[in-house]
Structure formats: structure tokens, C-alpha cells
Amino acid sequence: MSSHGILLFAHGARDPAWAQPFEAATERLRQRLAPQGDTEVRLAFLEFMVPTLRDAGAELAASGCLHITVVPLFLGAGGHVRKDLPALMDELAARYPGVQWRLSRAVGETELLIQALADSAWSLSRPD
């Protein structure tokens, strides 16, 4: 049983291939945390795909996570991150009052991802 959970939250799409980078990121995070053995990681979607944030949050709470960090896998904090996500988290907090829910910044607002985007654009724009 893990006391901490990380819930990666992406938008979702009708095309299943769209989720592949997010699934890969989820697996890499699991591998990174595996030696510690005290953190559960789940991927959830706003729409079109499963599991939903409600379902993945319920799964983490049921597995014994008492501290769950929701990490929006969005390039910026638009309406979904600023409005929809906090409302969904309020629902989870009401349903699981013994769990401490924390919302992180969108990954696209971190210096690490901004640099990775610039590096990727530079690499992709270079002639072969």
C-alpha cells in the first residue's frame, strides 16, 4: 500500500494513438519511482478516454493513498486547468475527505518543459 499518489491528467482524444506519449510518460514516471516503492501513479483524462479523473482518483484513494498530487499534462493553464480541473478535484475531496488533494502547475509552465520544447523545435528544424 502506498501513501502517496500521482495522478497525471490529460485532455483526451477520440484517436487512441493520441494517448501514446502520455502513456509513455506515465510508465517512465512509474519506473523512476519504482525503487522507492511508496508512490502509485495513474493517468486520467478529461474526456473521450478512460479512466476519468474521478475514476482514477477513486482507485488511488481505494489503494490507500492519503496524499494525491494531480499533475496537468497541459502545455498551458487554460480553462480546463483553471476551471474544470479544480471543480473535479473539489468533488474528489468531498468524496474522499481523508485524502489530501494537491494540484500542481501545468507541465507546460515548467522551465524544464519549456526548454525541452525549444530543444525539440531546434532539433526538428535542422536540415538532415
Image (cartoon, rainbow, N blue to C red):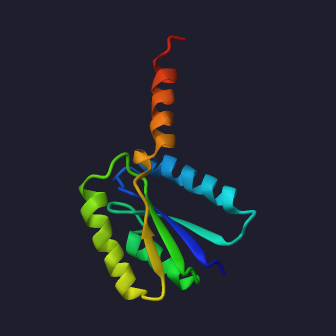
Please report the residue visible at 73 percent of the width from the left and 66 percent of the height from the top. 36
Q: Give the vertical position of 55 relative to 118 (above or below).
A: below
Q: Give the vertical position of 26 relative to 53 (above or below).
A: above
| Quadrant occupied by the N terminus | bottom right
Task: From the viewer's perspective, tell me whether residue 91 is left or right of residue 104.
Answer: left
Please report the residue visible at 44 percent of the width from the left and 50 percent of the height from the top. 107
The location of residue 29, given as percent across then percent down, is 61, 56
Task: From the viewer's perspective, tell me whether residue 112 is left or right of residue 76.
Answer: right
Q: What is the residue that sits farthest to the front in this orientation?
A: 111
Q: Quadrant of residue 38?
A: bottom right
Please report the residue visible at 68 percent of the width from the left and 57 percent of the height from the top. 31
Q: Give the vertical position of 128 relative to 21 (above or below).
A: above
Q: Quadrant of residue 5?
A: bottom right
Q: What is the residue that sits farthest to the right in this orientation?
A: 35
Please report the residue visible at 27 percent of the width from the left and 65 percent of the height from the top. 84
Q: Quadrant of residue 57?
A: bottom left
The location of residue 4, given as percent across then percent down, is 59, 74
